[in-house]
Each structure stands twice: as structure tokens, then as C-alpha cells.
Image (cartoon, rainbow, N blue to C red):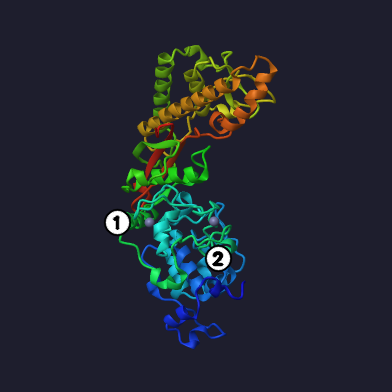
């Protein structure tokens, strides 16, 4: 630590004097530390609170941790977050000082308000700030929510980089890069708070004006965490987009479970939109046999018959998938071998292999071969544990068909682009190989039983599981424009 850091901040004895701290407050033993509850405000996040405490008392990350939390190198990291992430509170549980700053930091963190959803909708890769808010020493915990791109108070873009040199801000964690020189750019050393005159530091620390959106976000977070939402597949849904976009998508989906109004201009555009397909189907009980199985079979067969007729697919292919146009590769991906194969036919057969007991039959060897598979309509168990009535299950089956046709479309357009100008022959295989890898989760029922764009959430407002509801989300590509 630099011995003379206070002076390098231009923060000398006069400010200390103004704090009224009698000598005891700064005694060498450091039994007490300077802090005033006036320096933090409602809905302020933990990062700036810690930064202020750090600046006033001249403490770096290790000292902050020792004094406030007293945790050793923690292995509390969840879902790729920092081990001392300011999103989560797990590592703070051993806080030395329950009262005061440590407790303030803990209660201000998003994990306290939104548990267990904070890491699903917010990231700690970088500290995000509104320049105007930060000039008065404020950054809301909600600024870490990826779906928000503008400050709800000032409408300014939230930044994750230095305004002068564009270097990224430090991690949103009690880390060395963030707290060795708090609120300064790690690269050019400029104060992130721009007009913040450190001599008048404490005078500048003001609460921002009251903002309804921040109040609503906080209330919503509590409601979501109490809503009994069970969404096990969330961390891996949707596929193929950046973590920021994924978390923004999860936020949009959670907003459909627990409503929250957010002006569109505040929201990050995501490459896909989530559509609520089904709401209100009660979660199935353990008994999924008998009557229910018969109902599923009837519904499935009528969907299959209807779309086969509509899309010109011969009913003779119900027995065998093989029709010279579709192939299956070593990882179980069902592929159209040529861009001229109908995407509806491709999607249709992909869909059937999910339902018609195909994964067991797909004992494929190495290399590519035709789909010479016999499919049998037995249990139709996919999704059966989630939907208690055949009608709801039918909506699920139909949604799977639409999602698989969308995957077939993606395959087709990517293949068309990749094969443009490539002569037929072995080089085609080489060109297509990376595409197969990219879309394998969409095209292989062996790798992923459900279509990759689909997820189901169960949700219960009451304590009793009997009131649980299943909500099915489908991603719609390109629907944002
Ligand atoms: Zn602001
Ligand atoms: Zn900089």
C-alpha cells in the first residue's frame, strides 16, 4: 500500500479535521474507523459504500476484508462469479461487525434483495456506473442488472469503462484491482467520478433524487425471490448468446412471471425475444401413466398427422425416418444434407426423434449415415412429468415442433451461407463441420432432450406445491427488430 495515499488523493488533515474525529478515531491501533450513515443512501449498492469507507480510512482490499468480513480466501464462487463478488452475500456471512458498514454492505447487495436470482440476471465482470450518479458518490445495486442499459434516474448510459481511456472498470468485487485505488481508472488513474473534487469529497456525497424505477426494482426483486420460481435450466438457457445477453433475456422472462414495468429505452436489446407459450398448466403428479399416456398419444398423433399432411410429408415415413435427404452424424445430430431439403421436413423429423423413443434407437456408429431408424410410439414421456393434463402437454409438444423447425431454419441458412461457392465433394464436409458443432445442441436429441430454445419454469405463489404452475418460454430469433 502506498504510505501517503491520502495526500495523493488531495485528502488531507483538513478533511479529517472536518469529520470531527477526535484523535481517538485515528489512533494507531485503529480500533475505530470513520464512518457516517449520511454517506450512503437508500438503494445504494455495496461497491460505492465500500469505496467510501476505503477512501476515508485509507484501506485497501485486504484490510477492508480483514476489518469488515474477516474471511479467508473464500471458495464461495458461484456460476463464475468472483469469490468476493459484491453480488452475492454468501462469503460475507462471517462478517466481523454485524452492525455498521459490514452489515450495510451486506444488506445493500443484490444477492440480499434478489437471492437466488441475482447471478441469473446480473454480472460482476465489471463495475457499472452512471457518470452523474457517481459524481455524487452513488451507484445503485440495480446497475449491475444486465438488462438495464441506462440509469433510471438520469437516463444516461451505464458505463463499464473509463470515460477517458476506455479501459474496463474493475470487477464488481472486493478485489485488489477495485480497491487498491477505489473509484479510479486502473489504467490512466483518472477518477471515475470525474468532477469529484476529493477535498470536498464528503460534501459531494449526496443521495440522488428519489426514483420510482429503483424502488420498483427493489420491490420486484423481493417478489421474485418469494415467488417460488423453480427454473433449474436457467443457467444454460438460452444458448449461443453472450452472458450479458443471456442474463438480460432471463430478466425479461422473469418479468413475465412477476410483472414489472420498465420503459423500453432503459432496456438492452437482445437478439431474441422470449415468448410465454403456456401459463396455467398445473405441475404433473408422479402418476403419469394410464389415462394420461393415452391422452398424450392421441394428441401427438393428431399433431403429427396434421402437419405431415400440411407440409407434404409422406405418411410412409412415419415408420422410417430415412428418406435420402436427412442424415445423422456420430453425435446424433439430425441434419439436412443439402440446402434444398425442406426445412419443415427437417424440423418435423427432428421433432419426432425427441418423442418417439428414438434416443434409445439412435445407436449410431462413427461417421455419417442415413437415418434408417425405426421409431416406436410408446410412452411419449418427454415433458410428461411437467404437465398434468394432456391438453397442456399438447401445447408443449406443438411448441417443440415450432422450436425444432426454427432450428432447422437456422441450420439451412447457415449451411447456405457456408456452402456458397464450395464445390460438391469432400470439401463440403469440412465446411459444414464447424456448423454442426455450433448447432449440435439444437440438432441432436441425444445431447439435449428438449429443443434448445425452450425452457420450462414452475412457479408457485403459495407454500403448497399443488398450486404450482408451469410456464413455457420459447426464444424467437430476430424478433427484436
Ligand atoms: Zn444516474
Ligand atoms: Zn482511464
Residue 263 rendering spot, x and y as whole percentages? 32, 46
Residue 423 rendering spot, x and y as whole percentages? 65, 14
Side of 457 relative to 370 (left or right): left
Give 439 or 145, whichever is nearer the viewer: 145
SS state under label 1: helix
SS state under label 2: helix
Query: Looking at the rendering, in which quadrant would you find the C terminus?
Result: top left
Q: Picture quarter containing residue 81?
A: bottom right
Q: Which numbered disc, 2 or 1, marks the residue closer to the eye?
A: 2
In space, the residues marked 2 and 1 are separated at their CA atoms by 31 Å
Q: Which residue is mark 2?
A: 179
Side of 243 relative to 398 (left or right): right
> Relative to residue 220, is residue 20 depicted above or below?
below
- Give the quarter the ligand 2 occupies: bottom right
Give 379 or 274, whichever is nearer the viewer: 274
Q: Which residue is mark 1?
A: 212
Give 122 or 377, whichever is nearer the viewer: 122
**Does mark 1's beta carbon lie closer than 8 Å to ligand 1?**
no
Tell me the residue at 42%/44% (across/down). Answer: 268
Residue 442 rendering spot, x and y as whole percentages? 53, 31
Q: Does the image show residue 94?
A: yes
Residue 358 rendering spot, x and y as whole percentages? 56, 26
Tell me the residue at 41%/48% (across/down). Answer: 149
Amino acid at each position: 500500500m502506498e504510505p501517503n495515499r491520502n495526500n495523493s488523493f488531495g485528502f488531507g488533515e483538513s478533511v479529517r479535521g472536518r469529520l470531527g474525529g477526535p484523535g481517538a478515531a485515528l489512533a494507531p491501533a485503529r480500533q475505530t474507523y470513520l464512518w457516517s450513515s449520511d454517506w450512503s443512501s437508500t438503494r445504494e449498492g455495496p461497491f460505492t459504500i465500500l469505496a467510501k469507507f476505503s477512501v476515508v480510512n485509507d484501506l485497501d482490499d485486504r484490510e477492508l476484508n480483514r476489518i469488515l468480513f474477516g474471511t479467508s480466501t473464500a471458495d464461495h464462487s458461484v456460476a463464475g462469479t468472483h469469490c468476493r463478488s459484491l453480488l452475492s452475500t454468501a462469503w460475507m456471512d462471517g462478517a466481523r461487525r454485524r452492525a455498521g458498514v459490514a452489515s450495510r454492505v451486506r444488506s445493500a447487495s443484490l444477492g440480499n434483495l434478489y437471492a437466488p436470482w441475482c447471478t441469473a440476471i446480473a454480472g460482476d465482470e465489471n463495475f457499472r456506473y452512471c457518470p452523474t450518479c457517481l459524481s455524487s458518490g452513488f451507484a445503485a445495486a440495480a446497475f449491475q442488472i444486465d438488462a438495464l442499459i441506462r440509469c433510471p434516474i438520469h437516463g444516461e448510459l451505464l458505463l463499464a469503462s473509463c470515460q477517458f481511456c476506455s479501459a474496463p472498470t474493475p470487477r464488481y468485487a472486493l478485489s485488489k484491482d477495485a480497491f487498491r485505488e477505489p473509484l479510479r481508472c486502473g489504467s490512466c488513474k483518472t477518477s471515475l467520478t470525474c468532477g469529484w473534487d476529493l477535498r470536498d469529497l464528503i460534501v459531494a456525497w449526496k443521495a440522488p433524487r428519489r426514483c420510482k424505477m429503483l424502488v420498483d426494482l427493489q420491490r420486484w426483486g423481493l417478489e421474485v425471490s418469494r415467488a417460488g420460481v423453480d427454473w433449474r435450466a436457467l443457467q444454460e438457457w438460452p444458448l449461443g448468446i453472450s452472458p450479458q445477453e443471456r442474463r438480460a433475456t432471463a430478466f425479461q422472462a422473469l418479468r413475465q412471471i412477476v410483472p414489472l414495468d420498465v420503459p423500453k429505452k432503459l432496456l438492452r436489446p437482445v437478439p431474441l425475444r422470449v415468448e410465454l407459450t403456456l401459463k396455467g398448466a398445473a405441475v404433473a403428479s408422479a402418476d403419469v401413466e394410464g389415462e394420461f399416456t393415452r391422452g398424450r398419444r392421441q394428441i401427438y398423433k393428431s399433431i403429427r398427422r396434421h402437419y405431415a399432411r400440411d407440409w407434404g410429408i409422406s405418411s410412409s415415413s412415419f415408420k422410417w425416418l430415412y428418406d435420402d435427404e436427412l442424415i445423422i452424424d456420430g453425435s446424433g445430430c439430425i441434419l439436412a444434407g443439402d440446402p434444398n431439403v425442406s426445412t419443415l421436413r427437417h424440423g418435423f423429423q427432428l421433432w419426432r426423434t425427441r418423442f418417439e423413443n428414438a434416443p434409445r434407437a439412435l445407436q449410431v456408429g462413427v461417421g455419417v449415415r442415413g437415418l434408417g431408424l425405426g421409431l416406436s410410439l410408446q410412452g411419449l414421456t418427454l415433458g410428461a412429468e411437467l404437465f398434468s393434463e394432456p391438453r397442456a402437454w399438447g401445447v408443449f409438444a406443438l411448441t417443440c415442433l415450432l422450436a425444432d423447425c426454427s432450428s432447422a431454419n437456422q441450420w439451412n441458412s447457415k449451411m447456405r451461407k457456408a456452402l456458397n461457392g464450395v464445390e460438391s465433394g469432400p470439401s463440403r464436409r469440412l465446411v459444414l463441420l464447424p456448423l454442426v458443432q455450433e448447432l449440435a445442441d439444437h440438432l441432436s436429441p441425444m445431447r439435449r432432450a428438449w429443443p434448445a430454445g425452450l425452457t420450462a419454469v414452475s412457479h408457485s405463489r403459495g407454500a403448497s406445491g399443488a398450486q404450482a404452475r408451469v410456464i413455457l418460454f420459447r426464444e424467437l430469433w430476430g424478433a427484436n427488430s
